[in-house]
């Protein structure tokens, strides 16, 4: 250090005199296309969802079907509605999604991840709520691969003493 700090008053003057010590918050700009939509990709297990979000009345279309037709189980529909409820924007955005791979549960998780990513790109102020709920993080858990000499990933064949 160029100067010696020997008292608390010296320390206060050094700390308060440097505004560069406090980093400015990152200012995020909305990312929208010419139609006012935001696009994001969501992933879960083997499912990959391409999601477009635009302001609207709350209509959700997955692979050309309404949410109630594509995800018949109420639990899966609830999973898709979670990002809107956490962000406090229920029935304010329309969603168009195409999803491939995996099963219905993985696809619901992928669409949820894509909706969350697209919402925070469309309206950056929603990022804090979605991030606190953990919706912007990709769930990296996948099925463990089968090993040779085993029946499944860890299950061994039945042991025979004789």
Image (cartoon, rainbow, N blue to C red):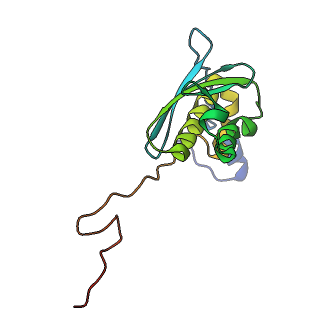
Q: Residue at point 54% right, 27% down?
A: 63
Count of numbered labels shown in the rendering = 0
Q: Picture quarter containing residue 26? A: top right
**What percent of the width, then of the height, locates residue 62?**
58, 29
Q: Quadrant of residue 22?
A: top right
At 38% from the left and 58% from the top, the residue drawn is 144
Q: Residue at x 45, y 43 (%)?
A: 102
Residue 118 locus on image (x, y percent): 59, 28
Quadrant of the snapshot with the C terminus: bottom left
Please tell me whether residue 37 is drawn above or below residue 68 in the rendered image: above
Specify the farthest residue to the bottom: 162
Q: Is residue 21 visible?
A: yes
Side (left or right) of 86 relative to 162:
right
Nearer to the camera, 63 or 6: 63
Query: 27 or 156, which is in the foreground?
Result: 156
- The reply to whether residue 16 is visible in this rendering is no
Against 9, is 28 above or below? above
Is residue 40 or residue 27 the one in the foreground?
A: 40
**Residue at left 72%, top 19%?**
56
Residue 7 relative to residue 37: left or right: right
């Amino acid at each position: 250090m160029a100067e010696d700090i020997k008292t608390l008053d010296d320390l206060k003057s050094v700390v308060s005199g440097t505004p560069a010590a406090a980093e400015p918050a990152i200012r995020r700009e909305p990312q929208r296309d010419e139609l006012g939509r935001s696009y994001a990709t969501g992933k879960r297990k083997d499912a990959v969802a391409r999601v477009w979000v635009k302001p609207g009345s709350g209509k959700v279309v997955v692979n050309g079907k309404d949410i109630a037709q594509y995800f018949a189980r109420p639990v899966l529909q609830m999973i898709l509605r979670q990002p809107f409820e956490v962000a406090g924007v229920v029935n304010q955005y329309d969603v168009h999604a195409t999803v491939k791979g995996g099963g219905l549960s993985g696809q619901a998780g992928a669409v949820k991840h894509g909706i969350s990513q697209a919402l925070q790109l469309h309206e950056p102020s929603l990022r804090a709520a979605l991030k606190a709920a953990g919706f912007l993080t990709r769930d990296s858990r996948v099925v463990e691969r089968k090993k040779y000499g085993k029946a499944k990933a860890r299950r061994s064949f039945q042991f025979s003493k004789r």
